[in-house]
Amino acid sequence: MADTLTIRLDPKDRATLQELARARGLGVSALVRELAEAEALRARRAAIRTEGERIAEYLATHPKAREELESYGVPAGEPS
């Protein structure tokens, strides 16, 4: 079950979100939840990309590590 999050908004910001929610056929809470979930997903994916880049940099500077990785072959479903 999800946890509750309480936030304070400036009246102008709340009015803007209410308009946006209404246009999407949502309540303000549902809209803010969707926005927060989308941002959390974006942040997780960015962290994964950053870690992948870190690994690629390591492999680029450590030929033995690249050799070890290449010894496992090409994953199924990827072009060889």
Image (cartoon, helix red, strand yellow):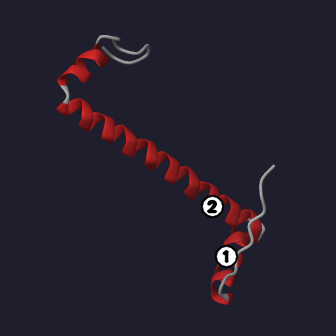
Evaluate if marks 2 and 1 touch, with contact meaning CB atoms under 8 Å apart: no
- In the rendering, which numbered label is found on residue 17? 1
From the image, state whether disc 2 or disc 1 is nearer to you.
2
**Residue located at (56% from left, 50% from top):** 41
Apparent side of residue 38 relative to residue 30 in the rendered image (left or right): left
Q: Residues within 10 Å of mark 1 (few under 14, many from 20)?
A: some
> Which of marks 1 and 2 precedes in the sequence?
1
Q: In the image, residue 52 lies at what x, y percent?
A: 37, 38
Quadrant of residue 53 within the rendered picture: top left
Q: In this view, does 27 lie above or below 9?
A: above
Residue highlighted by disc 2? 36
Q: Which amino acid, mark 2?
A: Ala
Q: Which amino acid, mark 1?
A: Leu
Q: In this view, does 36 lie above or below 16?
A: above
**Residue located at (56% from left, 58% from top):** 39
Q: Residues within 10 Å of mark 2 (few under 14, many from 20)?
A: few
Image quadrant in which the C terminus is located = top left
> SS class of the residue under badge 2?
helix
Q: Is residue 4 above or below residue 12?
A: above
Relative depth, front residue between 33 and 47 = 47
Relative depth, front residue between 62 and 27 = 62
Relative depth, front residue between 21 and 57 = 57
Q: In the image, residue 28 lies at what x, y percent?
A: 74, 71
Q: In the image, residue 74 lies at what x, y percent?
A: 35, 14
Apparent side of residue 4 relative to residue 54 in the rendered image (left or right): right
